[in-house]
Amino acid sequence: MNIEFDATFWAFIALLIFVGGMLYLKVPAMLASALDQRSQEIAKELAEARRLREEAERLKADYLARKTAAEAEAKDIIAHARDQAKVVAEEARKNAAESIARRKAQAEQRIAQAEAAAAADVRAAAADAAVAAAEKMLRAQITPASQAQLVEAGVADLKAKFR
């Protein structure tokens, strides 16, 4: 049996020495430790990612709830504003109607006052005209003797009244 030590044999021996050296230096344990450490970091990152996702979902739910509440509040505000607008419009119509009625009454009162003043002016003018006509007639009919007689009657009448 002749064993030849060729290059393949020496490569195999070198491989065994290399693997033995690796085992002696505990490289597989270091690799396993490094891989375990890396897996723990990845697990921490996944946990952090889950926590962030849950927080984001809570924030999203909170935002949606606030949005819904804001929309409901906006609808309430709009409905209240419409109701207020109706009330204000009705008050404005009522006030306008009352104002028109007041102004109409004032105008009718002024017209009545103007009619009364015109009637009084007409009566006064008629009385003045009657007095002027009567004066004219009396001047034409009264003689100096009848004037003296009227004055004496007036003086006698005054004396009777003051006694």
Image (tube, grey):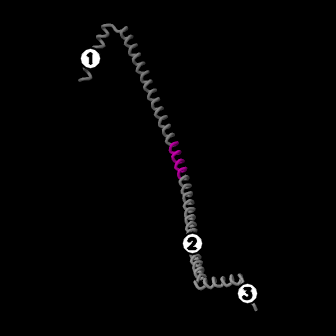
Disc 1 to disc 3: CB gap under 8 Å: no
Q: Is residue 45 above or below residue 160?
A: below
Distance Cα–Cα, label 2 vs label 3: 56 Å
Mark 2 and mark 3 lie on one chain; the one further toward the N terminus is 3
Residue 148 placement (x, y as % from top left): 29, 10
Residue 92 lies within the magenta run: yes
Nearer the observer, disc 1 or disc 3?
A: 3
Amino acid on which the number 1 mark rests in the picture: Val
Q: Which residues are magenta?
A: 80-93
Query: Which residue is disc 3 drawn over?
Result: 4
Q: Is residue 83 above or below residue 128?
A: below
Distance Cα–Cα, label 1 vs label 3: 190 Å
Q: Residues within 10 Å of mark 2 (few under 14, many from 20)?
A: few
Q: Nearer the viewer, residue 50 or 117?
A: 50
Residue 33 placement (x, y as % from top left): 57, 80
Q: Nearer the viewer, residue 149 or 27?
A: 27
Which image quarter holds the C terminus? top left
At 29% from the left edge and 15% from the top edge, which residue is drawn?
153
Query: Which residue is disc 1 drawn over?
Result: 155
Label number found at residue 45: 2
Distance Cα–Cα, label 2 vs label 1: 135 Å
Amino acid on which the number 3 mark rests in the picture: Glu
Residue 25 placement (x, y as % from top left): 58, 83
Residue 11 lies within the magenta run: no
At 42% from the left edge and 24% from the top edge, which residue is drawn?
120
Q: In the picture, residue 142 is in which quadrant?
A: top left
* Local SS, label 2: helix
